[in-house]
Image (cartoon, rainbow, N blue to C red):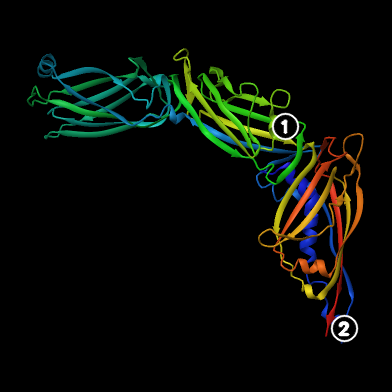
Amino acid sequence: MPNYKTYLKYTALAVIATLTLNSCTKDYFDMDNVADGNWNPSLAAPLVNSSLNMENMIAEYDNEDLVQVDENNFISLYYKSKIYTMEVGELVDIPNQALPKSIQLDATEQAALITNGSVQADRVDNFQFDTGGEAEITSMNIKSGAVQVNLSSQFQQSGTLTIILPKVKKVGTPFRMVIPLNYTGSVPLTVEQSAYLSGYQMEMEAQGGGNEIEIQYELALENSGNTVLPTDAVNLLISFNDLKFSALFGYLGQHNMEIPADSIDVNLFNNSIAGNFTLEDPRFNLIIHNSFGMPVAAEVVQFDAISNSGTIAFNGPNIPGQLNVNSPNMSQIGESVTTEIYLDRNNSNIAEILNSKPHQIIYQMNGLGNPNGQTSNNFATDSSKVDVEIEMELPLHGAVSNLVIQDTLGFNFKQDINMIEEAMFRLDIENGFPIDAKVQLYFTDAYHNVLDSLIIGNTSIISSGVLGSNGRVSQPSKKVTDVFMDTERIANIRQVEKVIIRGDLSTSQQGSTPVKIYSDYTLDVRVGAQTKLNISL
């Protein structure tokens, strides 16, 4: 993620890298000026004339919208990550299921068919409906799905089979499917028929830990004059296929929510090697969004910051510890409610953790739905879920004191070094940032062995702007610095392949005063180079 330290570094150091890389060109060596004999001119050329603000400096890093600028141009770094999601399908995922049924006529019904010319045989089943988990459902609003009936009849009579689901209703009317049995002279008579259930509400009875629905059958037969055998039957299979709900009510069961140990990399201090770094108002949030209508208990098992100096555990409200997660009530069906653990420097040790320059945060959490068992009715919609997120907000308001940072760049001196007798770089800098910097640039070989440095001593080439009474820079500081390199020093960098840029950074008043960073602060840089060449023709 983008970080405060990186922006401070680029405020102070990107100028040096730009100067070094841009100055090593042949653009100012004009062959038209070459004459017979020894040529010993001094050539001067402007290299850089730019005005940098914080938006320029962070544009390369703000590829995830992690930088926020408020209406006053004050900058904050914002990190957010979703570390866990539990969706409704983990609690209730209704599988396809089927109920076989065989209907035969008893002796009384057979006699009525022969004597009266017709008969209606009524049957009732209680079907144990599978909800795909521990849930005990009392009612369900069906979003989609179908009932399919596959039937085979041995009766040599015509009639109808009516299937009724008295507790599955649409606008108050129970589901009813009428299947015609048209005997045409041969058996078995086979029929397949289906009907959609979208828009129906299914009510269930919780019996023995199960979910029961009542199914009624009405078999009506007309006597065709053919023999009625005691073994004659209608055999059918009732299937419930692809059922999806928009909402369900009942008891969703106890469900473990385990967030296994994992880690988050913190890049904030990757390049810092010494010094102190403090932020005035760091904030850390643990946020749980819950749209299940059931109680949830959560436990923060581990929340540690890992730095080069060791491990520090987060300490604050409920960290570590248990908390009850808020859940929506019946008037909030379809909504998500939030539970938040908010840490700042007043209620936690987050300031101490940031001062330790952590490079990793390790976390582990557990949760349990309906921790006290079946004490209340639950509900869920097809979009219900539990999300756990962490947020870290770092307003760029703080101080650094002798914070030593460094970075390494590839380098290739493309100028013909043998032609150069002397080089002088002039840096004309106007600094509107509240940051002092002592900067050094080391030339190294491919193995990071130092061959030379650009500046003799740790010269402060970037001074802090002057702070006004409102805490903002009221007047930029200005400084001109000349850096000379003679033939001997130029020869030292013949084999340079890398450059180490090291900065010693302090905010205003030697790092004793916290400052704020605004997006309209600028760093105006003008760089010129003068090179003395010696060419024999």
Residue 85 in the image, given as x and y percentages of width and height: 52, 32
In this rendering, does residue 325 appear at all?
no
Q: Give the residue displayed 83% in from the left and 80% down from the top.
A: 535
Give the image quarter of residue 346.
top right
For residue 284, above or below residue 496: above
**Mark 2 is on which residue type?**
Asn
Question: Helix or strand or loop: what does disc 2 sit on?
Answer: strand
Task: Say which of 197 and 405 sits in front.
Answer: 405
Q: Residue 192 vs residue 479: left or right?
A: left
Q: Residue furthest bottom?
A: 36
The quarter of the rendered structure image containing the C terminus is bottom right
The quarter of the rendered structure image containing the N terminus is top right
Q: Residue 3 vs residue 71: left or right?
A: left
Q: Residue 317 vs residue 274: left or right?
A: left
- Residue 38 bears which disc, if any? 2
In this rendering, does residue 505 appear at all?
yes
Q: Give the residue displayed 80% in from the left and 46% down from the top.
A: 504
Task: Say which of 154 and 98 sits in front.
Answer: 98
For residue 261, above or below residue 462: above
**Mark 1 is on which residue type?**
Pro
Question: Helix or strand or loop: what does disc 1 sit on?
Answer: loop
* Within-10-Å neighbours for mark 2: few <14, some 14–19, many 20+: few
Sequence-wise first label, 2 or 1: 2
Q: Give the residue displayed 80% in from the left and 56% down from the top.
A: 16
For residue 186, above or below residue 323: below
For residue 209, above or below residue 47: above
Residue 68 in the image, given as x and y percentages of width and height: 73, 39
Give the image quarter of residue 499.
bottom right
- Residue 282 bears which disc, if any? 1
Q: Residue 55 vs residue 159: left or right?
A: right
